[in-house]
Amino acid sequence: MTELQIIELAKTLGKELKASKKFAEYKAAKEEFFANDELKTKLSEFKVQKDLLDKQAELTNADEQIIDAIGARAETLYREINEHPVYQRFQTAEQEFNVLIGAVNSTIGSFLSDTEASATGGCSGHCESCKSNCKH
């Protein structure tokens, strides 16, 4: 097989991944996340608070009350962002899509290293090499 044929296979795999339900869920959740004004505002403020906290921590005579106040506000924002349903959907969809990509990469890597086991429970799809009794 030529390099060009391998690249064509990779393009096909990319198109199939893009057409997958996991990618569609990830893309929709990402768009919803980045379109949410409330979350954008909280993320911006969190970044500002984090920068202020970092700068205060660098000072030799930093005021502990200021550091505590900034830290408390940053923690509140962090919790509000992480508890927001839109953010949770985005995080879940991103993690699930990353698991799929990881399984694809692991499967490819397993064939390159001749172990033929994937991240999806050890099934390579080649039953003749199976030792895990997965009943593929």
Image (cartoon, grey):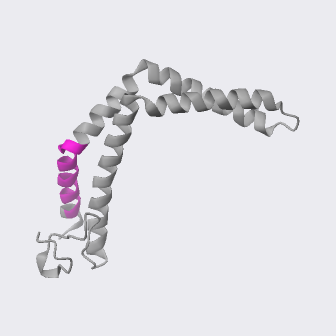
Q: Residue at x 38, y 35 (%)?
A: 88
Answer left or right for 117 relative to 129.
Answer: right
From the viewer's side, name the closer residue of 39 and 9.
Answer: 39
Expressed as whole percent of the image width and height from the top left, the position of residue 118 reads 26, 68
86 over 126 or under it: above or below: above
Answer left or right for 109 relative to 67.
Answer: left
Answer left or right for 65 relative to 10.
Answer: right
For residue 133: magenta? no
Q: Residue at x 31, y 33 (%)?
A: 29
From the viewer's side, name the closer residue of 5 and 132.
Answer: 132
Looking at the rendered image, the quarter that the N terminus falls into is: bottom left
Main SS of the magenta part reads: helix
Q: Residue at x 71, y 37 (%)?
A: 54
Q: In the rendered image, which quarter is residue 7 located in? A: bottom left
Expressed as whole percent of the image width and height from the top left, the position of residue 85 reads 37, 29
For residue 12: magenta? yes
Q: In the rendered image, which quarter is residue 75 located in? A: top right
Q: Residue at x 32, y 54 (%)?
A: 99
3 over 41 or under it: above or below: below
Question: Residue pushed farthest top?
Answer: 37
Expressed as whole percent of the image width and height from the top left, the position of residue 70 reads 69, 28
**Bounds of the magenta segment:** 6-22
